[in-house]
Amino acid sequence: MKDVLPAIERWRERGDGVAVATVVKVYGSAPRPLGSKLAVSSRGEMVGSVSGGCVEGAVYDAALESLETGQGKLLHYGISDEMAFDVGLACGGTIEVFVEPLTW
């Protein structure tokens, strides 16, 4: 969280909405550890990482959606034969990411 807090504070001070994505479960090999965070401002700025790049775009989109809806969402990313051409983790592991809008 320390890596995303300064940006969250800046965004909050200027009145922007903020959504935070957190890795809440890891199965097998994963590019980022449990607890890794990515924050997105309502202006579209992003800081942090939940996957080292392989699913960041999908998580970014989900964060913007959570800002619009005000709802949190649990996301599941991994790799399987059916997902080979979709968003997934090249490392072969699986992660669950919880995305939620921050309120203050």
Image: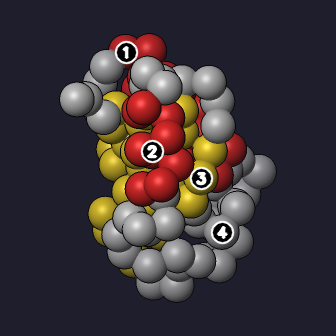
Tags 2 and 3 in contact by the CB under 8 Å rule?
yes
Q: Disc 3 residue type?
A: Val
Q: Disc 1 residue type?
A: Thr
Residue at 30 percent across and 34 percent down: it is 102
Rendered location of residue 81, percent (x, y): 66, 61
Mark whose residue sits in front, 2 or 4 = 2
What residue would you read off at disc 2? 8
Residue at 42 percent across and 31 percent down: it is 13
Distance of label 2 from label 4 (alpha carbons):
20 Å
- What numbered label is drawn on residue 69? 1
Rendered location of residue 64, percent (x, y): 53, 27
Distance of label 2 from label 3 (alpha carbons):
9 Å
Name the N-terminal-most of marks 3 and 4: 3
Image height check: is 50 above or below 85?
below
Image height check: is 19 above or below 79?
above
Mark whose residue sits in front, 3 or 1 = 3
Mark whose residue sits in front, 3 or 4 = 3
Name the N-terminal-most of marks 3 and 1: 3
- What numbered label is drawn on residue 47? 3
Tags 3 and 4 in contact by the CB under 8 Å rule?
no
